[in-house]
Amino acid sequence: MQDFTVNPWEVKGKVDYDKLIAQFGTQPITDELRERIRRDAGDLHVMLRRKVFFSHRDLESVLKDYEEGKGFFLYTGRAPSLGMHIGHLIPFIFTKWLQEKFKVNLYIEITDDEKFMRNPEYSLDDTRKWAYENILDIIAVGFDPNRTFIFQDTEYIRNMYPLAVKIAKKMTFSEVKATFGLDVSSNIGIIFYPALQIVPTMFERKRCLIPAGIDQDPYWRLQRDIAESLGFFKASQIHSKFLPPITGVEGKMSSSSPESAIYLTDDKDIVKRKVMKYAFSGGQPTVELHRRLGGNPEIDVPFQWLYYFFEEDDNRIEEIREDYKSGKILSGELKQILVDKLNDFLEDHRRKRDEAKDLVNTFKYDGKLARSMWEKLHE
Ligand code: TYM
């Protein structure tokens, strides 16, 4: 019996990412491939250096198309919820870097429909309201307003519908049922929904690269079965690991247990209280023991978070690792390093989020790419 689960709605247990690569049939990002990205991009993002983005499909083909001047485009998305947490930003922060380095178009799907249909307790008004709020957080990451189109399914559906029905006709209920664990009592909206997550992979007749958590992979497996028969490329992906919840390195940070997540709206005191009180520590029970035996950074959540991206300096992170292992840094001190980093990050984010209010229309309707997308009917 496997002791972890990863699917689009649930991540449980301590994920073995090597096993997941074998299970999902994806490829590891090798040192050689990382060097090729470094050559093409000019440098290497911290999440690539640290193997937060660790797996892919057909990334070589995307780089080849880029190197030959054929280009490619980026696509990612978000099912809106009441509040976004730090983990949700991982694909967006990385996608921003890709867009900056490769100067390509980016499509961001906001699935107010998916969220509504999947959760009996949410109204469509709820998910639309959250869509607006989440879009502010996404814009705050800093995408190129002329090369980015953010669209909400319930608004952009008319332009997507012809392609959606062509995709839907190629997929059977039994495939979707097996892929997503649905059954005959599932509402018919959620059975159709995968077609809508696949449509944006076909927004251009170029290769599509999808940066996202590996939980979204089942959609792309379905896409790859049918894309070529519709005259499009199989979607390429680059997959990230999950930022662990604050309470321990198992599962993923998730909105369903609020004390285990740091929300983008958490103020300085809340961040400090959550980290100090709940962060799972790899340290020893007493200071004396800790000084003697040292801590274990592999299971220490504050260290893991710093490693994922909050401490970008490679020398500094290794220094912290060694000092923690030797007992020179105490658990409380390590937590404080994280609290300071988090609060700096969040303060900056909140300022940009505020400024984003003036940019919503640009990204959704009247920026250069957005305008051209509203004129297009996808077939
Ligand atoms: P959603 O809203 O569940 O998640 C949005 C993105 O965040 C990633 N993610 C995480 N990454 C790292 N650590 C975590 N703890 C963590 N939690 C979530 C997810 O992998 C995802 O990339 N159906 C989609 C919405 C969607 C989409 C897409 C996502 C539509 N089109 C294209 C990616 C690409 C959803 O429910 O995402």
Image (spheres, grey):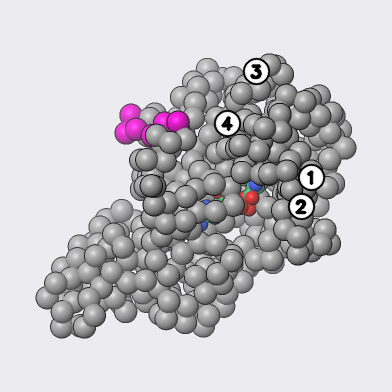
- Looking at the picture, tell me which residue is in the foreground, 378 or 63: 378
Q: Which residue is mark 4?
A: 221
The yes-or-no answer for disc 1 within 8 Å of ligand 1 is no
Between the C-alphas of marks 1 and 4, the distance is: 20 Å
Which numbered disc, 3 or 2, marks the residue that appears first in the sequence? 2
Separation of marks 4 and 3 at Cα, in angstroms: 13 Å
Q: Which mark is residue 189?
A: 1
**Of pointers 1 and 3, the one earlier in the residue sequence:** 1
Local crowd size for mark 1, using a 10 Å CA cut-off: few (<14), some (14–19), many (≥20):
few
Residue at numbered disc 2: 117
| Region in magenta | 25-32
- Residue position for label 3: 228
Kind of residue indicated by mark 3: Glu
Query: Which SS class for mark 3?
Result: helix
Residue at the outermost front position:
184
Q: Is residue 203 left or right of residue 212?
A: right
Q: Do labels 2 and 4 touch, CB within 8 Å?
A: no
- Number of labels in the image equals 4
The Cα–Cα distance between marks 1 and 3, rounded to whole angstroms, is 25 Å
State the CA–CA distance, disc 3 to disc 2.
29 Å
Instruction: For label 3, count other residues whose C-alpha is less than 10 Å away and answer few (under 14), some (14-19) or many (20+).
Output: few
Contact (CB < 8 A) between labels 1 and 3? no
What is the CA distance from the residue labelled 1 to the residue labelled 2?
6 Å
Judged from the image, the secondary structure of the residue bearing numbered disc 1 is helix
Measuring from the top left, give residue 161's x and y in whole percent: 84, 33
User: Is the residue marked by circle 4 packed among few (<14), some (14-19), or many (20+) residues within 10 Å?
Assistant: some
Asked if the stretch drawn in magenta spans residue 246, the answer is no
Q: Is residue 144 visible?
A: no
Q: Which-is-in-front pick, marks 1 and 3?
A: 1
Mark 2 and mark 4: Cα distance apart in space: 22 Å
Closer to the N terminus: mark 4 or mark 3? Answer: 4
Label 2, residues with CA under 10 Å away: few <14, some 14-19, many ≥20:
many
